[in-house]
Amino acid sequence: MKIIPTIMSGGAGARLWPVSREAHPKPFIKLGDGKSLLQHAFLRAALLPDVEQILTITNRELFFKTEDEYREINDSDIACTYLLEPMGRDTAAATAIAALHVQQAYGDDAIIILFPADHMIRDLDAFRAAAVRAIDLASSGRLVTFGINPEFPETGYGYIEADGQNVVRFVEKPDLARAKEYVASGQFYWNSGMFCFSAGTMIGLMQQHCPDILDQCRKSLLAAHQSSAASGTQVALDRDLFAQVPKNSIDYAVLEKAENVAMVGCDIGWTDIGSWNAISELIEPDESGNRINGDTVLIATENCFIQSSGDRLVGTVGVQDLVIVDSADAVLVAHKDHTQNVKQLFAQLKANGHEAHSLHRTVHRPWGTYTTLEEGQRFKIKRIEVKPGASLSLQMHHHRSEHWVVVSGTAKVVNGDQELILATNESTYIPCGHKHRLENPGIMRLVMIEVQSGDYLGEDDIIRFEDVYGRQ
């Protein structure tokens, strides 16, 4: 019997701005131990019994970033498959795609353990034990959910009412009075959003309860482009067909309608990382109740969470009950009682067209990264890193010229009709309208400084002629 852990990774993580952005969503947030939420999810998946393959469902634009995250920690060389969505269609679509893919690859009896990348689980032994119980139930044809024994009357989670291992009903996020009743009854559990099922069981239930979602996902998967490399298999779903999949959560589409749903109740140290308050709970408080991550100096400060993500010192005097998050290009200051409302700030940034809702100062690309160091009237300065063996597209700009200076490594440059090899401290000037390409032919990272000048310096002033990655 094949066990296929499946990680759902995506979303905007609007409540965790300014660290989470659309191009750098919540799963990629680094915690105090230096690992991201996504890396923790991968390591949890690798602990499950007899795992030979880990499946990840993510947005197509996040594939290379996900691949880099896994490469850092996949010491056992577990095989990876990436199901790449062109856009988000909620968890019912993700579940259908996973079930259909696993059915095709391993058959109806293969067991899928499906969980989001943006949770933390502190007791990994208890998690593995709960997963073993869930696998046993799923192999008998049950659809299994993981219920978390509630530690307090939380109003931010959905609940599961259960009679032993049998689910009675799912309920929405309650108000405080009802949450207290749920916890006091001993029959309600937090809905973790983690599930276990055989591929055949889930496909049968979706055919019964949401055939429109299943059928459109099947069409998109049949038309998908599949490719393989040393790092794993990529399955890129067809954009036009996947766009027609109805949006719905797996809870609404299947779980709340299905019969014979089982629950594994567990104490696994589970946390849904849905706000800065949840992030702060992962850090031990000091004697004044402050939870600190980064370089800080605190005077008369109590019960605050402060994170300094950049090179700056954060100092506070005479404040309490605040969340302060400093990033390279933005600072969040919020009262701890209002951290759920950070999503409103994120939405306003997006509505205003502000780049800070989507991009960080450092932007990841398939070939490496670029960091905007300074920007002013008619100029922009970037630090560019190119991975060994990687190259940018052959491209041209209508409104800007560029000057490239190699800081370390070796650059192979196409500049108009010329092809150049540049070593450290060497440079080239690329006039507006010249076709050009940057490549790293060496075995070390190429680091260079790019100075742009012109009337318009937006990232959309680019014409691509040859593009290895499909887009940059």
Image: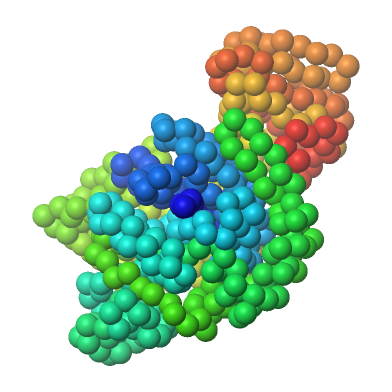
The mark total stands at 0
What residue is drawn where x is 41% and y is 49%?
Answer: 45
How far across and down, in percent of the image, does residue 143 sit?
Answer: 46, 71
Which sits in the foreground, 104 or 33?
Answer: 104
Which sits in the foreground, 458 or 116?
Answer: 116
How far across and down, in percent of the image, does residue 11 sit?
Answer: 54, 60
- Is 105 placed left or right of 175 in the picture? right
- Is 447 placed left or right of 239 in the picture? left
Which sits in the foreground, 26 or 90?
Answer: 90
- Is 210 placed left or right of 273 in the picture? right
User: Which image quarter holds the C terminus?
Assistant: top right
Image height of 404 relative to 328, above or below = above
Which sits in the foreground, 279 or 193?
Answer: 193
How far across and down, in percent of the image, does residue 87 sit?
Answer: 67, 59
Image height of 163 relative to 242, above or below = below
How far across and down, in percent of the image, does residue 79 sit?
Answer: 52, 38
What residue is drawn where x is 72% and y is 69%?
Answer: 215
What residue is drawn where x is 70% and y is 21%?
Answer: 439
- Can residue 30 be seen at all in this image of the molecule? no
